[in-house]
Image (tube, grey):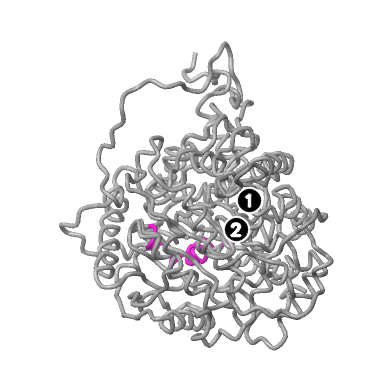
Amino acid sequence: MNLTPEDVDHVATLARLGITAEDRSRFAEQLSDVLEHFRALQALDTTGISPTAQVFNLHSVMRDDVARPSLPREQVLANAPRQEDGFFRVQAVLET
Amino acid sequence: MHGTLSPLSSRKGDGARGGAFCPAIAAHGMLGEFGLMGAPGQPAGHTRHMHVTREHLVGISGDLTALTAPEARDLLVRRQISATELAHAVLGQIERTESQVRSFITVTADEALAQARAADVALGGSDPGATPPLTGIPVALKDLFCTTGVQTTAGSRILEGFIPPYDATVVARLRAAGAVFVGKANMDEFAMGSSTENSGYHPTHNPWDVSRVPGGSSGGSAAAVSAGQAILSLGTDTGGSIRQPASLCSVTGLKPTYGRVSRYGVVAFASSLDQVGPFSIGVEGSAMVLQAIAGADPMDATTAPFAVPDYRSTIRDGVKGLRIGVPAEYFTAGMEPDVERLVREAIQTLTSLGATVHPVSLPYSEHGLATYYIIAPAEASSNLSRYNGIKYGLAALDEVDMTRAMDATRQRGFGNEPKRRIMLGTYALSSGYYDAYYRKAQQVRTLIKADFDNAFASVDVIAAPVSPTVAFKMGARIDDPLAMYLSDVCTIPVNVAGLPGISVPCGFDHQGLPVGLQLIGKAFDEATLFRAAFAYEEATSFHRQRPPLAEQAGSEGSVNQAAMGAGKAGGPQRAPHA
């Protein structure tokens, strides 16, 4: 499996991860190596084998629907890089 | 029965980690007047069963940082030492050794002393034995457990300055158990790594040889306990991150069954694999910690609703009749000969104690690494999407566009390994590749788990190496992700199957570097792991040996170490870095 620098760009965009030109070629090489090493999996016959997402098959764990106190707003906002009027403040999402 | 059947039993190892008691305050917990009182004379295992008395101090350094957790508990309850003395001892050890080891990102000395004073008040009451079981015992926390008011970074610059407004469930439970928190231990960034070199802050050094890695990702937690900077510590294990550093630093480390311990308030790496567990000197300390932290938590729906057994009540039941499975697949080609020899000797020791050995086969384990390196990065790429500069952590405030700000925040804040894994995971989950990678890996996961189920139909525990090699040199694998990933080849399948595993010290290679024995148990059967591991350590003394660096901290200890070493074969008689 070979990842091209263009593949790396595409995946980086999906992951919202800025990368440098140097990252691009290094990741293309390193990720190709890793994927190549793991190719053996593709050869395994897994016909009829159900996937395991979680090992102990706990299903739909329910709790009582009871309100309980949550953190006060100022504590929740205390780590925010920017806040305003009790909200998280972010940069513009849509161009104006 | 102590050690009488083992070829290793002639060792008088207890002194190195021997009990101590302190009738009076001594600066930093060192009991200088006791340090030179002659040669060790105790039979192996003697001090651990009974109250430590003055006689037991013969030949023992009196260094409080050498205490095991049950010894510390015993001395605290009988008011032979105070929690404040013990806190001063470990904080003093941090002060003396931290420039060499660098176990911590944050040391919380003031908080520790305040907690210790509160512990002393509790222990000064009418019934000190009724105090919570970890009252006054110093604990280091891996820096991914949320701690109210104390910075929690997960080893990443992207979380620098993050002050959690709440405690992780495990932290709250240790607090309720009376623990004294000495600091936040260093780790590979977001627990991604096997050497603690991926920390965004600084690497941690192996106390046995500071030119080598302590393992990872919980390298700070392992090194801290090994160096006597804490009596106990807490780490997480996603692919070996407790067991491998425990092995490389010669301490006990337990990865509990998935679902045994709450992950609420633990910075997430791979949510179907992550599990919280303890480090200790001696198996019993790990049992004490698991007792305190295990059990269902309404804040984590993946915790199991099963009752938590009393681990210490069965820990001394021995291994007579215990069926130990040995999987040929885990004694791999790349394994160092000393590692294989010591692990096989350890299995032999267990049989000499009455266990029986049975070959088992885990053929799909060879695909564990590939399975893991698809599932774990996939989950990580999702978990790490929250670090985007909005709610907490680093933010690229200079960017005016939201998307570009996120790109820049993550580019600046994440180190290379998280970036690699985010890329790998995003790729494996992306359109067109999901079935080939992620679904395939989840199917192989089913097969790996089925192998273990089959094996456990006829054995009670499985014995294997922890790491195929001893601690490697710093820098040796940092630019070769695959070589680094191979460090975890013997531990990863256990996470993939969700099973419990423990690493216990089982000797030292020709360079004096530690090796660990891994025991793997049935789901939710940590009690049997503790029992087998405890029987093993009772018959040996490896867990009692301290790195010279820990002993060098007090001259008395050094003298004692030298006296102990005389006539002993195979142990680390010198500091590899000295």
Is residue B369 one of those drawn in magenta?
no
Q: Residues within 10 Å of mark 2 (few under 14, many from 20)?
A: many
Q: Residue at position x 62%, y 83% from top?
A: B11
- Can I make out residue B196 in this image? no
Q: Chain ID for label 1? A: B
Residues tagged 2 and 1 counted as in contact (Cβ below 8 A): yes
Query: Magenta-highlighted stretch: main secondary structure?
Result: helix
Q: Residues within 10 Å of mark 1 (few under 14, many from 20)?
A: many
Is residue B483 one of those drawn in magenta?
yes
Q: Is residue B263 left or right of residue B68?
A: left
Q: Quadrant of the C terminus of chain B?
A: bottom right
Outermost top residue: A85
Q: Nearer the viewer, residue B72 or B11?
A: B72
Label 2 – label 1 distance at C-alpha: 7 Å
Q: Earlier in the sequence, mark 2 or mark 1?
A: 2
The residue that mark 2 highlights is B69
Say which amino acid is labelled 1.
Answer: Ile
Q: Quadrant of residue B573?
A: bottom right
Q: Nearer the viewer, residue B526 or A78?
A: B526
- x, y percentage for residue B403? 50, 28
Q: Residue at position x 41%, y 40% from top?
A: B382
Say which amino acid is labelled 2.
Answer: Ala
- x, y percentage for residue B465? 46, 73
Outermost front residue: B126
Q: Is residue B314 above or below residue B218?
A: below
Q: Is residue B386 left or right of residue A60?
A: right
The residue that mark 1 highlights is B137
Residue extent of the magenta highlight: B478-495
- x, y percentage for residue B26? 81, 56
Q: Residue at position x 40%, y 60% from top?
A: B526
Q: Quadrant of residue B221?
A: bottom right
